[in-house]
Image (spheres, coloured by chain):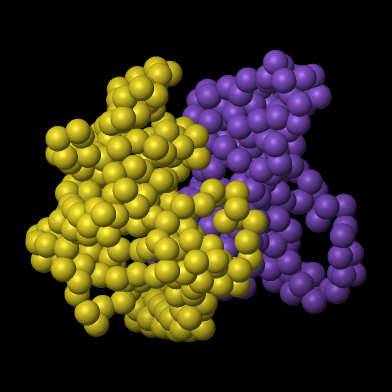
Chain colours: A yellow, B purple
Amino acid sequence: MQQSNTYIIVFSAVLTIILGLLLSGTAQVLGPMQQEAIALDKKKQILGAVISAEEIDAMSPEQVNEFYGKRISSTVVDITGKEISGVEAEKVEIAKDYKRPADQRQYPVFMFHAEGNPDAVESYIFPLYGAGLWDAIWGYIAIETDMNTIGGITLAHAGETPGLGARITEGGVQERYIGKKIFDESGELVAVQMQKGEGKDYSSDEHKVDGMSGATITGTGVNNMLKAYLGHYEAYIKAKSSSQAVAGL
Amino acid sequence: MSTETAKAIEKKPAEALFSKRRKKLVTDPLVDDNPITIQVLGICSALAVTTQMKPTLVMAISVIFVVAMSNFVISLMRNTIPTRVRIIVQLAVVATLVTLVSEVLKAFAYDMYKELSVFIGLIITNCIVMGRLEAFALGNKPYDSVLDGLGSALGYSWIILTVAFFRELWGSGSVFGIPVFDTISGLFGPDFKLATNGLMVTPVGAFIILGLIIWVQRTKTGYVEH
């Protein structure tokens, strides 16, 4: 009986249904909590571009939400730098949008406001997305109000090699970008290039940072990602910097 | 024929909850029959997740849960599972349990989920799980199977935690994320600095530590590969 085909088919069907119900039930129950966790993680990543990882780790989820709500405002622009209304910046899925041609994507901009003075913007945070060696890499870059100096960067990855390319998530690597410039003297967008090899001093060069030994391809991926996304935001950045120049006069 | 029936009816006194045999089920895989150091199973995840203590602990707990629970479930069903599809049935049960773990982590410990996601999924193919199901759960009672699963999973856990301890200490200079090297360096003035070893962060570091553990263990137990 146990070896008959009918028994095997019925057994498999019943087992599949039971396990399937169990799994979909769990997914239903845990779904809202997972969504919340993902949203919180995104906020942490965005904040990571402007405050240190230790500070974020020290905050409870409620504190992160409160801090984010108080200090970050957002908008969405298109590739020409014009604002798109009716779209919530936090809802834009960069990874999905990445598959569309660059001029059809939506580009969220997050503004980090000064403490105590909600009108003053301290830095502009732009998302980044690209390809590393094995899988996707992404992050957020904060540009200061001169629209040229990098205030901070957070980088993350899906599957870079641990100890090599995966080091882009380390504070020590990300700190190398702070204070670098994205435009050269003639106003050309050159972004910042991570170099091959590690341990050299690039403090005098505004557009180069020290590389990660053994992770040159990941480094190149980061370079391409920075160049591409800063390029997509170039119109917005230029518009901001000229309006600020006018305001400064 | 008649003697056989008589034997079956004869009632044996119930075995103690923690009889000697049952204790052996749990303690054997800890040292003498350790899944990693003796059977050399489950090496892939032992290499991959052990750069730091925290994710390793989460991984260990997940493996303990999956091995014990799958042993239990398969043992409950052992007399109904058709032999021809038993591997698929085992896989379905293990995969369900692993997905449950991964969903729970995603909801309650998203940072850990991000760090471990691939490796939690890979518990499905962890040789320890399937090995215990085939070798033990299919032929033994549920309670014994749970004990057997716990033993193997604990044997796996203490090894990966030991590896992670040394790798995190030497590789990142901390234990459970608490900086140790910096604190020690601080005691000896500003010029003194304990250097971390980059090799320990890569899988090679795990091989070295694992090799040392196996060496020490086999020196003590006198185990020889046949």
Residue closest to the eye, B124 or B169 = B169
Q: Residue at x 27, y 59 (%)?
A: A247
Q: Residue at x 42, y 33 (%)?
A: A176
Quarter of image, res A13: bottom left
Res A240 seen here: no
Give the side of residue B49 with respect to residue B64, left or right.
left
Give the side of residue A228 with respect to residue B40, left or right.
left
Percent position of residue B194, x then y: 68, 20
A187 over B110 or under it: above or below? above
Residue closest to the eye, B75 or B201 = B201
A15 over A68 or under it: above or below? below
Residue closest to the eye, A2 or B75 = B75
Q: Quadrant of the C terminus of chain B?
A: top right
Percent position of residue A35, x then y: 45, 75
A212 over B54 or under it: above or below? above
Quarter of image, res A177: top left
Percent position of residue A188, x then y: 14, 39
Q: Quadrant of the N terminus of chain B?
A: bottom right
**Marker count (numbered):** 0
B211 over B10 or under it: above or below? above
Q: Residue at x 39, y 37 (%)?
A: A179
Res B153 seen here: yes
Q: Residue at x 70, y 62 (%)?
A: B146
Residue closest to the eye, A153 or B116 = A153
Percent position of residue A248, x then y: 29, 55
Give the side of residue B48 with respect to residue A181, left or right.
right
Quarter of image, res B193: top right
